[in-house]
Amino acid sequence: MAGAAVGDVTELGRYAVRLATGAAELVRSHPAGRSRIATKSTGTDLVTEVDRASERWLVEQITSDRPGDAVLGEEGGERTGTTGVRWVVDPIDGTVNFVLGIPAYAVSVAAEVAGAVVAGAVCNPVTGEVFHAVRGGGAFLGATRLGGPRDVALERAVIGTGFGYDAAMRERQGVVAAQVLPRVGDLRRIGSAALDLCAVAAGRLDGYFEAGLNPWDRAAGELIAQEAGCVVIGLRGGAPGPALVVASGTGLAPALTALLDALGADRVLA
Ligand code: IPD
């Protein structure tokens, strides 16, 4: 970590909240109904003018307030920096929900220092909820400290998951999901990985797993879940990553990861 410019993690956390709530305000004031929609990696991977405007606003703010910081954004906003801080931003996580008017989408902002996420904020523009955390400081929903999910056996646990935009990958994910379903209490597919991870932090889901996530989908949410006391891992003792992210309470983690391991849930990428 490179000195005072990057050292104030609390300030990075405050700034992450300011960015996420500011971009969420912009998203709230631009309904999807009036926005032009384009596709990206596949015909179901959507981007709207509002995603682009939200990311533009985020990058402009960072460039003007913290000109030496780097940025990585879902919609192509990428800037190198000199301070060792990188902002990883998703201007709308859950774009399909945004387009359909399902109120489960969010702006996600994370600050990395020397490659490790140290602060994050996730704001749902519809509910106004702001989840946030700094490394070592706990996780919060607004001012309320989060403590992760209840202690529950796998066969009663409600588990969130998500699916990619590639049809062949979704077929493999569907096979895994079909085998998970009878072994857990129920499954949810909410449609925003950032909110799924925050839902585990807040005890609204008992656990969550997904393959194929990008850094901007998961950076802030993973920190928030970890700071709420959750286990956030990959399989076979590995770190969470593109192959798989698993999040749950500590009691559920061994059974959930053993099940996902047996099903090869981290082997579904194209
Ligand atoms: C998507 C959402 C979705 C998840 C996908 C992500 P986007 O992000 O988080 O829940 O299942 O894997 O790509 O495209 O809406 O920013």
Image: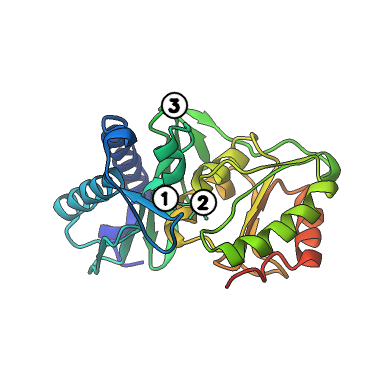
Q: Earlier in the sequence, mark 1 or mark 3?
A: 1
Q: Residue at x 57, y 41 (%)?
A: 190
In the rendered image, residue 20, in percent from the top left (x then y), is placed at 34, 41
Instruction: Inspect this view and state whether residue 171 appears.
Output: yes
- Report if the beta carbon of the residue with label 1 is closer than 8 angstroms to ligand 1: no
Kind of residue at badge 1: Ala
Residue 114 relative to residue 139: left or right? left
Which residue occupies the foreground of this view, 209 or 68?
209
Kind of residue at badge 2: Leu
In the rendered image, residue 216, in percent from the top left (x then y), is placed at 42, 56
User: On the rendered image, what quadrant is the N terminus found in?
Assistant: bottom left
Kind of residue at badge 3: Thr
Residue 28 relative to residue 196: left or right? left
Q: Are marks 3 and 2 in contact (CB under 8 Å)?
A: no
Q: Residue at x 70, y 67 (%)?
A: 235
Question: Which label number is shown at residue 119?
Answer: 1
Give the residue at mark 2: 223
Question: Which label number is shown at residue 127?
Answer: 3
Q: Are marks 2 and 1 in contact (CB under 8 Å)?
A: yes
Other residues around mark 1 within 10 Å, as few (<14) / some (14–19) / many (≥20): many
Write down the quadrant of residue 255 in the picture: bottom right
Q: Residue at x 47, y 61 (%)?
A: 214
Whether residue 31 is situated above or below residue 160 in the rendered picture: above
